[in-house]
Amino acid sequence: MLQNNKHIIYILTLFLISVGIRVPNLNRPLSYHHEFVTAHVLRILEIWNEEGISKSNYNPKVNYKGEENKFIKNQGTDLVDKEGNYYYLSYPPFGYYLPYFIAQLTRQNISVSFLQIFNMALHLIGCIIIALILRLFTFSKDILNKTVLVAASFYFLAPGPLWFHSNTYMVDMLSEVLLLIQVYILSLIIVRRKTNIVLLLSLFAITFFHCYTEWLGYFVSLSCIGILLSRYRTLDARKNIIIGISMASLIALSLTLYQYASIGGVDAFIETANNKLQQRTGWNQLTDSLGSYLLNFVQIGINYGTSYLPIILLLLGLLIMSFIRNRFITPAPFSPDSYREEGSTTLKVLLILTVLPITLHHMVFSNFSGHDFAVLKSAGILSIIVSFLLVHYVKQSRLLAVITIIIGICNVSIYYFINRPGEVSFRGKSYDHYLKQGSYINQIVQKDEVVFLKGGDLSPQVVYYAKRNIKKVESIADARQYLIEVSLDKGVLFYLDNSHMDYERIRIVDNTSK
């Protein structure tokens, strides 16, 4: 573990600074910049908490209890069970399990603040793993101290991680940390050139949990197996490592498929999975417009810019400096007194096990990667590589500190520009917009009434604050027809827009309405 007390002080100090920077935006109403995914996860956790997770067969159900909430999709996938419950099946379920069971064990209420604290704790754990990774290929204590400090600064203060490891939680945030742990364990095995039962079991467990959290885990597993098959043939227990990774991945996949197929049958699940795959990959865009498909990759580039622009510019500068020095001036070799003999091996392994699966994930799920939180998975490797290069090329401690501080200030400035504190976003939208609409619905509707919405934005935030599933309709006639179809006789039709909220009640009597 971390043997240097300085590293602990660096990490905790920068973590507390990052928390202080976030304070103005913590526990405010769920609103913009992908807080819809936080609302989505909170709804799943609340449903489990209210009904018991076994009632949902441990699947991420999106329908609240009560027949008035059934057969209403609200951000679920197309798969529905016989009771009218929809489920969110875009990911395996462990990313929902972990915060849920932590809340149960610690007797915490499922709330926005709980999920934000959980998410920030993941950020702290991720930085600790980064420091452990850096120890694998740095030898000099001075070099290690500087690299850990710079990497922690980049990782904690980059605009993307600052936001996505606090206000926005989806399983991708847990996946980012599991990726770092998975890479650390395998790098540990390769650098030490030996294995033991603890390392093998740890690698098996983290591979299983990552694959049971996000599809990225399978890309990492393939990369691990590929590097072990092509290299390191003399590595102890290489065969056992490959078998362990393969078994963990297959068990996670089989369990996920079994769970989700049990909802509505194998055929229905296959159809739903295929539709979701087409949507997330963007491959269906290829039949319509190649340009539209290629725009997905432009958006991925924009997302990296909004999340890491100062760090990426620094990386480009360092790479240009490296090229010029190696081509036209005297190269700056890595001193054996500063870096471990296995350092170059570790660096290569690290790049293969992070850059390769991340790139594959972006390429396969190009449409999904249009969400800017999809680039969070790169936070760790960017922090490691840029800090490593910066410390290598900038020998003067004062200059190193100045560059790190400037990058930190730029990062925080971008964070505050995009996520402006206060009551109104930088686009002029009120942060309590969805809270007001959802609370209004919650106050008006009675327990046995179906909620309908005409106009307005049927966002996950509105559903979360209303604590009810909401059926979007085009007219009151549509609402009446729906009530007849599901054999219910009471409903409320809400009219919501940016400046006006109103409603009218609907009653069905002998297949007529009033």
Image (cartoon, grey):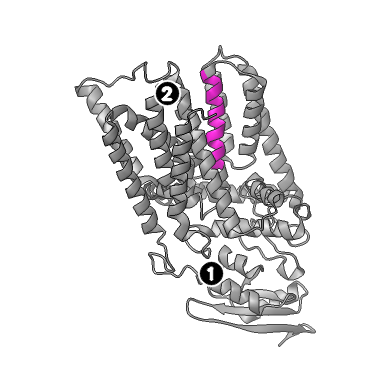
Q: Position of residue 193 (x, y in %)?
A: 55, 15
Secondary structure state at the residue bearing disc 1: helix
Q: Is residue 357 visible?
A: no
> Residue tagged by mark 2?
138
Residue 505, quarter of picture: bottom right
The prevailing secondary structure element of the residues shown in magenta is: helix
The magenta stretch is 175-191
For residue 118, side relative to residue 360 (left or right): right
The crowd level at tag 1 (other Cα within 10 Å; few <14, some 14-19, many 20+) is: many
> Residue tagged by mark 1?
434
Q: Earlier in the sequence, mark 1 or mark 2?
A: 2
Task: Give the farthest residue toward the left.
Answer: 328
Which disc, if any, is residue 257?
none
**Residue 181 located within the stretch drawn in magenta:** yes
Secondary structure state at the residue bearing disc 2: loop
**Mark 1 vs mark 2: in front:** 2
Decide which of 249, 210 is in the foreground and name it: 210
Please give the name of the residue rendered at 40% of the width and 61% of the height, measured from the top-left corner.
Answer: 420
Q: Is residue 174 visible?
A: yes
Residue 251, quarter of picture: top right
